[in-house]
């Protein structure tokens, strides 16, 4: 899975990761939400007890990760070498600049880059690189950020295909983002104000080399975001002309989750280090500890000597264990896919288990829901394809997908038993979905909405332009944006959903509440942003009717 594909899942249900159709989303919104389901597994917390049950001791149930290196489920499991290095590092004090220079030099020797820097995560490193380039190593400028008044270079160019939620790390410095759609637009966008170009590695025409060939002659640094990629030695992106390439420490490299790895130009990375803690300035909040710096170096040291082919064989063997356990399940088909030679993004073998939901009376999403909310908890991916009228299309299919690279020894047997038990459990065919109740009222019109967030309130409005039986269509006006609203009314239960999307950001809000007279009260599921409460009141308008007259001429007084 490429990082762009991961980005698409940021507005989806965590752990299971299923994409809900519009109708399914509304059916799902009337059930307990993912965070309610997860919290149901949390027992009353007690005193923290170090040991294998450390999470359970405070009432939190851990997860077997068959999903991927998602931050929200803890990303990767640190290598033993990393944990050992961090354990020793935390026992001694050290001058942090000296440590950074020693780590930077050693990283450059291992990977063949000019320099290296450890940050407190990939996004933090991107933030520091941007601040360093903007300030140019000049602390008088550095301490003014994000006030860029008087700065010569204040713009960062990003191809539209590379805009993503992580480019907040760049925007936070106060720069103006110039979004371009074509290579020709990129060439024209470079001006004396251009500080940097940021991109994710892509296919033609947006390859790193193609962009570097434009950036280098213009003297513009190129920052490449390779967060979820495998580390290449020598580095493929630096060879293609990138100034700096940024990796996440807690993904495939299996270093500390709260660490990032920046490789490339020593001048740029020294400016970035100057902008970061322990120094005071715009990136002081991105503090990286001596433990993470040593842990990240240990991860890179290990990466350079690990037998990656043997690792891949081990991962495939785990999937094979699960695959064999599925043998004999009616309609179930299994497929193990290995990553292509040279694949960089989240390169892991995966097992997809596909079946006919009408034969087993359960969908992949339901399997994933049970796996993530009952012990031992397991995170998997899901898929669904509806059968078509055409005879060639076959029956509907549903599936779960298991990624191997973040599993641990013995997890394969646990996962095999759990999935097999769920799929072979006898269950009745699901009852036909009950039709919705007749709407309790006609609710077309304007509704004034008050949203209660954790520490603030916000005024919004719904314009219900059309009510077609149980289905509603209209507009959701927020404080800063207007978006399409669609939903339904089932008796007195009302459900709406709106989605706001701009380059670099996505926000999905699902409103569900009860209608009582001219008021709707309920909650909002905001996916990764958790929830909020809302109250909507039907707007009333004056009853007086007044004819509007057109002035006969220009005004004689004002």
Image: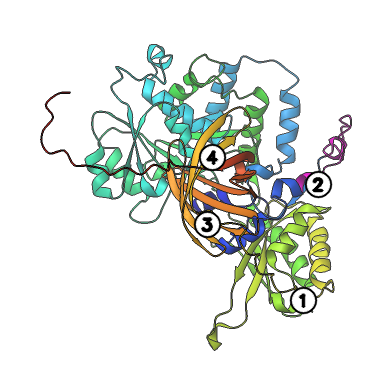
Q: Is residue 67 visible?
A: yes
Residue lying farthest to the top in this orientation: 140
- Residue 427: give x, y in percent of width and height: 82, 73
- Name the residue rendered at 82%, 47% in the picture: 41
* Real-space Cα separation, disc 3 to disc 2, in angstroms: 39 Å
User: Are the residues at dot 2 and dot 1 in contact (C-beta closer than 8 Å)?
Assistant: no
Coloring applied to the structure: rainbow
Circle 4 or circle 1, nearest the eye = 4
- Residue 510: give x, y in percent of width and height: 58, 49
Q: Secondary structure at mark 2?
A: helix
Q: Is residue 92 left or right of residue 528?
A: right
Q: Which mark is residue 343?
A: 3
Q: Which mark is residue 306?
A: none
* Real-space Cα separation, disc 1 to disc 3, in angstroms: 42 Å
Q: Which mark is residue 40?
A: 2
First along the sequence among labels 2 and 1: 2
Circle 1 or circle 3, nearest the eye = 1
In the rendered image, which quarter contains the C terminus? top left
- Residue 232: give x, y in percent of width and height: 52, 46
Q: Is residue 143 left or right of residue 375?
A: left
Residue corresponding to mark 1: 429
- Name the residue rendered at 61%, 64% in the picture: 338
Q: Residues within 10 Å of mark 4 (few under 14, many from 20)?
A: many
Q: Secondary structure at mark 1?
A: loop
Magenta residues, dominant SS class: loop
Circle 2 or circle 4, nearest the eye = 4
Residue 135 against residue 248 in the figure, above or below: above
Q: Residues within 10 Å of mark 3 (few under 14, many from 20)?
A: some
Q: Which residues are magenta?
A: 38-59
């Amino acid at each position: 899975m490429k990082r762009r594909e991961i980005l698409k899942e940021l507005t989806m249900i965590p752990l299971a990761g299923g994409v809900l159709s519009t109708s399914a989303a509304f059916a799902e919104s009337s059930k307990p939400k993912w965070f309610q389901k997860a919290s149901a597994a949390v027992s009353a917390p007690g005193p923290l007890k170090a040991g294998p049950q450390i999470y359970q001791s405070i009432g939190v149930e851990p997860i077997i990760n068959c999903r991927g290196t998602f931050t929200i489920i803890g990303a990767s499991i640190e290598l033993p070498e990393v944990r050992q290095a961090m354990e020793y590092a935390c026992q001694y004090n050290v001058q942090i600049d000296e440590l950074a220079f020693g780590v930077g030099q050693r990283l450059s020797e291992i990977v063949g880059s000019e320099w290296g820097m450890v940050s407190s995560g990939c996004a933090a490193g991107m933030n520091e690189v941007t601040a360093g380039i903007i300030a140019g190593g000049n602390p008088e400028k550095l301490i003014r950020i994000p006030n860029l008044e008087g700065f010569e270079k204040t713009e960062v160019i990003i191809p539209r295909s590379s805009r993503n939620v992580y480019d907040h790390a760049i925007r936070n410095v106060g720069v103006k983002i110039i979004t371009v759609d074509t290579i020709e637009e990129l060439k024209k966008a470079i001006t004396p104000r251009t500080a940097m170009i940021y991109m994710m590695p892509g296919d033609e025409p947006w390859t790193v080399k193609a962009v570097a060939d434009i950036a280098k002659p213009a003297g513009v640094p190129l920052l490449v975001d390779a967060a979820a990629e495998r580390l290449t030695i020598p580095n493929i992106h630096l060879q293609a002309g990138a100034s700096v390439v940024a990796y996440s420490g807690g993904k495939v490299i299996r270093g500390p989750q709260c660490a990032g790895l920046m490789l490339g130009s020593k001048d740029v990375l020294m400016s970035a280090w100057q902008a970061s803690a322990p120094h005071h300035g715009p990136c002081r909040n991105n503090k990286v500890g001596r433990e993470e710096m040593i842990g990240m170096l240990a991860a890179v040291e290990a990466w350079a000597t690990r037998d990656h082919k043997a690792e891949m064989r081990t991962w495939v063997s785990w999937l094979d264990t699960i695959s064999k356990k599925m043998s004999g399940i009616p309609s179930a088909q299994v497929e193990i896919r290995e990553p292509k030679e040279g694949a960089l993004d989240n390169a892991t073998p995966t097992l997809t288990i596909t079946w006919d939901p009408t034969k087993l009376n359960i969908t992949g999403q339901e399997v994933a829901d049970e796996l993530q909310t009952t012990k031992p908890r397991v995170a998997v991916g899901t898929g669904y394809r509806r059968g078509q009228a055409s005879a060639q299309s076959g029956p509907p299919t549903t599936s779960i997908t298991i990624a191997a690279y973040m599993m641990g020894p013995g997890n394969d047997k646990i996962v095999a038993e759990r999935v097999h038990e769920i799929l072979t459990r006898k269950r009745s065919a699901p009852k036909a979905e009950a039709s919705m109740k007749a709407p309790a009222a006609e609710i077309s019109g304007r509704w004034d909405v008050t949203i209660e967030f954790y520490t603030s309130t916000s005024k919004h409005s719904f314009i219900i332009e059309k009510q077609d039986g149980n289905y509603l269509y209209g507009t959701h006006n927020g404080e800063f944006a207007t978006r399409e609203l669609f939903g339904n009314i089932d008796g007195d239960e009302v459900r709406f959903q709106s989605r706001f999307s701009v380059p670099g950001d996505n926000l999905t809000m699902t409103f569900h509440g009860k209608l009582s007279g001219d008021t709707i009260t309920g909650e909002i599921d905001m996916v990764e942003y958790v929830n909020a409460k809302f109250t909507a009141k039907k707007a009333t308008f004056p009853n007086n009717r007044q004819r509007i007259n057109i002035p006969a001429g220009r005004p004689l007084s004002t």
